[in-house]
Image: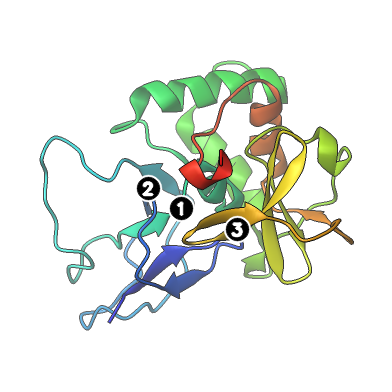
Amino acid sequence: MPRQNCVTPFSELIATDARGTLMGIRGVLHDDQRRIRRAFVGTRWIFCVLQFKNRHRIVMTPKRYTELFFLDEATAFAAGHRPCFFCRRDDANRFRAAWEEGNGVKNIRAREIDAALHGERLDRGRKRLHPLPIPVAQLPDGAMVQAGAESFLIMQGRALQWSMAGYRKADGALDDVMLLTPPSALRALRAGYQAVLHPSAMS
């Protein structure tokens, strides 16, 4: 049975055989029977590489952090995570530089990024949606939006429907669109951070 540890752009934890391309952390979310008991612990939500220096872990080891999995960086950003400064230092520094430029700040620290993201992640315990600051077609590559019950990646001005297995072309125009990517992360994308996307986004 698959574990309930794959993350959607809506920040929900689902059970699926797909594992995606990134791992992430929000604290210890599972119990000793490897069942999810909470959505997060604290404000430090990060995403990491799948493998790091040949280290091996048993997924959902009791009393250890819960390993979460994302399709790609766009999904992780939409869910409210940011790059890890330990296993993804170069990417994290690129993201911080783009964050500073896009948000008009200097010398920001990881915990300050976490605090800003946390204020944009949730609304009364549920995924917070944001109004679009610009038209959908003008959103940067890697931004994600919500239309109806579905989530969509924006890539070169076109919408691709998300699934944990990959992206496919959206059927028709999107209506009543809301932004899933936290606004401060979106500004980092607009400032030049290039999110690493699942190969299906390029096909």
Distance in Å between CA atoms under marks 3 and 2: 14 Å
Asked whether 119 or 61 is in front, the reply is 61
60 left or right, relative to 179: left
> Is residue 92 in sight in this rendering?
yes
Q: Which residue is mark 2?
A: 21
Q: Which residue is mark 1?
A: 71
Distance in Å between CA atoms under marks 1 and 3: 9 Å
Distance in Å between CA atoms under marks 2 and 1: 5 Å
Label 2–label 1 contact, CB within 8 A: yes
Judged from the image, the secondary structure of the residue bearing numbered disc 3 is strand
152 left or right, relative to 197: right
On the image, the x and y values in percent for residue 120 come to 67, 50
What is the quadrant of the N terminus in the image? bottom left
Asked whether 173 or 195 is in front, the reply is 173
Residue ID at (40%, 45%): 47
Asked whether 10 or 136 is in front, the reply is 136
Q: Which residue is mark 3?
A: 162
Residue ID at (14%, 56%): 57
Give the class, few, some or many, for how many residues have Cα within 10 Å of label 3's Cα (few <14, many ≥20): many
Q: What's the residue type where badge 1 is placed?
A: Leu
Label 1–label 3 contact, CB within 8 A: yes
